[in-house]
Image (tube, grey):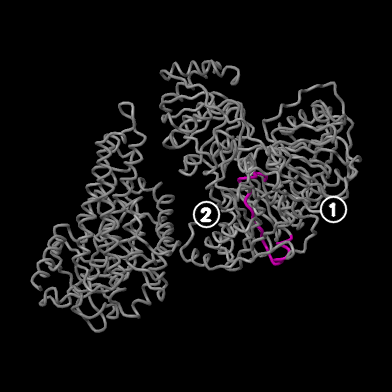
Amino acid sequence: MDYFITEQQTMIRDLARKIAQEKIKPVAAHYDETEEFAWPIMKILADSDMFGVYLPEAYGGLGGGIMDMCLVTEELSRACGGIALGYGGTGLGALPILLHGSDEQKKKYLPDIAKGKRLAAFCLTEAEAGSDAGSIKTTARKEGDKYILNGTKQWITNAGEAEIYTVIALTDKSKGVRGASAFIVEKGTKGMEFGKKEKKMGIRASATREVIFTDCEVPAANLISREGMGFIVALKTLDTSRPGVAAQAVGIAQGALDCALEYSRTRVQFGQPISSFQAVQHMLADMGTQIEAARALTYSVARMVDAGVKSVSKESAMAKLFASDTAMKVTTDAVQIMGGYGYMRDYPVEKFMRDAKITQIYEGTNQIQRNVIASHMIKETLKK
Amino acid sequence: MNIIVCIKQVPNTTDVRIDPVTNTLIRDGVESVINPFDAYAIEEAVRIKERCSGGKVTVITMGPPQAENALREAISLGCDEGILISDRKFAGSDTWATSYTLSAAIRKIGDYDVILCGKQASDGDTAQVGPGISAHLDIPQVTYVKKIAEISAEKAKVERMTEEGYDVVETPLPCLFTVVKEINTPRMPSLKGMMRAKSAKPLKWTADDLEADASALGLDGSPTRVVKIFTPEPRKGGEMLKGGAEDISKELAELLKDVVI
Amino acid sequence: MPASITILLHKCTGCTLCVKTCPFGAIHMANRKAVIDMAKCTLCGACVPACKFSAIELKKDSGPKKDLSAYKDVWVFCEQKKGVIQSISFELLGEGRKLADKLGVKLAAVILGSGIEAKAEELAHRGADKVYLVDHPALGSYQDDPYTEVLVKLAEEYKPEVILCGATTIGRSLVSRVAIKIGAGLTADCTELDVDLKERLLLQTRPAFGGNIMATIITPNHRPQMATVRHKVMKEAGIDKSRRAEVTSKIYPEEVFKSRTRLVDIVAEIGETVNLSEADIIVSGGRGLGGKEGFAMIAELAKALNGAVGAARSAVDADWISYSHQVGQTGKTVCPKLYIACGISGQIQHLIGMQSSKVIVAINKDPDAPIFKVATYGIVGDVFEIVPALTKEFRRALNK
């Protein structure tokens, strides 16, 4: 389908596709198996300017938007959703600075992120604050021109590998979510440590660790926006980044469909390629249609974000919900089409299926997305 | 460190097919690409520039006007400037005339420390143009370079691939190197490089821009002439052997009896 | 008068035969007449005989014919390494003998080296009527500058009609420079040589476009006519110990041997570099081998056959085996007597490097793999079953 992307976006997509095909695809199984972080690929993405596509030119980026970021994420995910997350996770960590940071903060951090010199991470989730993000317990106590952070963030993407962390912590426990604030913490800050690397079902090339703050001193200049704005920063960040998760899901689904399609043309049973059987054809048709619908929704929302639409909560939730459910279904069907071969690690589709699952879970489970969507819908009727 | 890279635009061999009826090359829809070996030369040039912190990489090509695309691609990969050497007077150049023309262009550029070429072009496979250029310029050469171990303003120490291993060769600069695949892994283009390439304006030089002897250009300057072009009988698929691994092995050993002994 | 090509519009019928023949895609039809795109045309002339209506006129000849009668004899540049004459030189002497006999001239061997006087006899036994020998410490190992200088001096003094040289690393580096210095025509990588007796022209046939087309090339107006020849294509000259040659040992002033480059070290990668271009039998592996272990199996079969190990690019890129084993477009071009491709699908880039092998055996699990299209014998099956069985069988057959 033609989405009438710009000349620059076409260039970005084509180069991301080339990198995914030539550099990521051959090593995807290796990083899945070893669970190593794919630094050589991050270097390639950095050198090719991919980390800067959505950042303003003033900060060393290419001046594009979330749509550009989605195109890159989708193409990388088509080869490996885990490696793509090293890229996507940096975007998530950079967004609070981009959306709410001061000019000094942007000048200090965004150029390195745009160049890919430093990766970023976003720290919200805690052991007892998952879907219920409002119950975070990490605190930030102001002392002179410093904040002292205490608490443990859990399942943080890029933790340990990234150098720039945006952290949500409570500056005023009594105010609940209104007492949360956002901070920039650099790796190496005293009192900041990382937990052991988590062992995951999928996206195993990505690094997931705890980030532990013990009397961690952060300069007051690293407060993003004002005290008490932490949750607004977090929600706005997630609303903006969700099309990225959707794009990751679309990419994973497309990668699985590519494999299944290729396999169905060459696999011969009963004397003919299995693609000649209607049962297989109908599955392929559904997979292709669902992916295209997910892509169309994802791109539309990304463009809404780039056009500056004030609230995209409902739409970005819809994109993430639909694309991730599609990814789960399509990857499961891809394994089914390839039968026993699909189940074996010799072929990449079982990995796509494992990778797809997380997209239904992180950055808000799909149940939470449905809550968000429904509550917006109901509110909208009340307004009428 | 000023570096000149000589590249050639060639048809992409992945696309080259033979018409089964007429037995000729099908050229329709065949994409033109940078000669695969030249990609290593471009990468090495950019690496030398990075290593020696500074200088300029000039990429030159001799070919039809559309070869400008190859120059743009080279710029997107880190080359600073491109020069297209194009003139109908160059038509029919063999390796003698081609290396003469390129050396005339290099003389015009003037200031260089290193010239890099791919070891050969994938369409001609001659490996003669690189050494030809160094002979015309009367500078030293090292062919089949697989590693530039040391390089400074005055000299370089390189490894030259041989049939048995490699030679370590020291050379003063300026020098011409032809490089093999083993020397590096070419980088991906960068988006900023691609944008720079899009707006770049490669220089265009014709025969009149070169201080060259007109009788040494093109077909007239080429000692060799192609008198016949034909397609070899395409190799036909032969016999398929069937059966268990052992039976097949016995059969094959029998069939190859005269070859292996 | 510069060379030109013209379509004679009154004769052109718009039949499109020339369009199909042009190897450079330089001809298209406009208003039912052929049009030549001069940006693409190389004036190769392939279209001229293809036109049934004589509608294409190619004017190539420039200037009066030079008197080339001073040039005679066929020379073979004989490559030596550590004093050992390389087998390619014997192949060239075999071919050179035929050409010299046809032309009715002498066959001369040229050898440069250090402490190599005794080699003249060996070259005589291989059919050389004359041997030009230059012995100097600076010529012990190949270096571009002194080798070029000496060969240029010899050619200028003795004026050979033809110089043949191996299309080896040394050969290609050396004669490319010599041809420029003496203004000679040079054709690379020939697979077939013949002579046009009337014009005393060397007919040099070589593959282009990775062997997809063949071109025959001549050097009408320049001497010597120089060619590099592929390894393993020509038959080695036999040994006749009764033969004697007229030996000319040349001495040149010291400055002739000066080299700007300095050979610091010669490193032999023992066991690592197999001389693929020398091997009569090559057993090659590709992606289908699944890993380094697969190559151990390939090496066993190669050993049983006294052959070398080759590889497809995918296996080299995956680091299963070093680049020196790579066969194909970005690797080596080989033409052994027997090429066994194991688990290689046969991408065009690979086929380019091995399709001139005399016998090709392909083993692959995919019956549609393109490798079968060039294979003399094809086996559809599991390489891990078939290769060990073959190793066993060949060991038995060869009594190892």
Residue B237 shown left or right of residue C24 in the figure: left
The quarter of the picture where the N terminus of chain A appears is: bottom left
**Residue C81 visible, this orientation:** no
Residue A193 higher or lower than B141, as above or below: below
Relative image position of residue B152 (x, y in whole percent): 64, 63
The residue singled out by tag 1 in the image is C255
Residue A379 higher or lower than B8, as above or below: below
Q: Residue at x 58, y 27 (%)?
A: C281
In magenta stretch: residue A363: no
In magenta stretch: residue B120: yes
Query: Chain ID for label 1?
Result: C
Disc 2: CA contacts within 10 A as few (<14), some (14-19) or many (>=20): some
Quadrant hosting residue B117:
bottom right
**Disc on res. B186:** 2
Q: Nearer the viewer, residue C61 or A78?
A: C61
Q: In what element is the residue under mark 2?
A: loop
Relative image position of residue A347 (x, y in whole percent): 33, 40
Q: Nearer the viewer, residue B76 or A26?
A: B76
Residue A87 higher or lower than C243, as above or below: below
**Residue C295 visible, this orientation:** yes
Query: Chain ID for label 2?
Result: B
Q: CA distance from mark 2 to mark 1?
A: 41 Å
Disc 1: CA contacts within 10 A as few (<14), some (14-19) or many (>=20): few
Q: Nearer the viewer, residue A126 or A58?
A: A58
Residue furthest to the front? C10
The quarter of the picture where the C terminus of chain A appears is: bottom left
Residue B111 shown left or right of residue A59 in the figure: right
Q: Of the residues shown, which amino acid type is indicated by label 1?
A: Glu
Relative image position of residue A144 (x, y in whole percent): 24, 84
